[in-house]
């Protein structure tokens, strides 16, 4: 999203929108295949409720951070996540 020219709150909002659409598509596919038991619905609801405060925290943080600091944090998270995936892949 940063490479597409978005910054600050636009990155957070766009990422949230993409996540919602992908989540709804996944639900539709798994529900259509009969592979989504009621326990999974409950777990998804609990995770959604637990994750909601994070969106408000992100909003406050992006209001206070400079664009360079925000981009740096996002870059660090992507690098750390990629490194974690590589390490996990090497363990298997």
Image (cartoon, grey):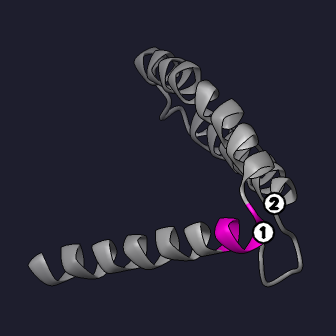
The residue indicated by pointer 2 is 8
Name the residue rendered at 80%, 47% in the picture.
63
Residue 12, image x and y in percent?
76, 52
* Span of residues in magenta: 66-71
- Secondary structure at badge 1 equals helix
Residue 67 lies in the magenta stretch: yes
Instruction: Please indicate whether residue 17 sits to the left or right of residue 81 in the image.
Output: right
- Mark 1 in CB contact with mark 2 (< 8 angstroms): yes
Residue 28 occupies quadrant: top right
- Residue 92 shows in this picture: no
The residue indicated by pointer 1 is 67
Residue 24, image x and y in percent?
72, 39
The quadrant of the rendering that contains the N terminus is: bottom right
Label 1: how many residues lie within 10 Å, few (<14), some (14-19) or many (20+)?
some
Residue 63 position (above or below residue 1): above
Residue 20 occupies quadrant: top right
Name the residue rendered at 70%, 31% in the picture.
56
């Amino acid at each position: 999203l940063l490479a597409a020219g978005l910054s600050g709150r636009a990155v957070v909002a766009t990422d949230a929108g993409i996540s919602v659409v992908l989540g709804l598509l996944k639900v539709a596919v798994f529900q259509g295949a009969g592979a989504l038991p009621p326990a999974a619905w409950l777990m998804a609801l609990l995770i959604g409720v637990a994750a909601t405060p994070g969106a408000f925290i992100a909003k406050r943080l992006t209001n206070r951070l400079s664009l360079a600091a925000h981009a740096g944090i996002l870059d660090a998270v992507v690098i750390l996540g990629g490194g974690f995936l590589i390490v996990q892949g090497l363990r298997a």
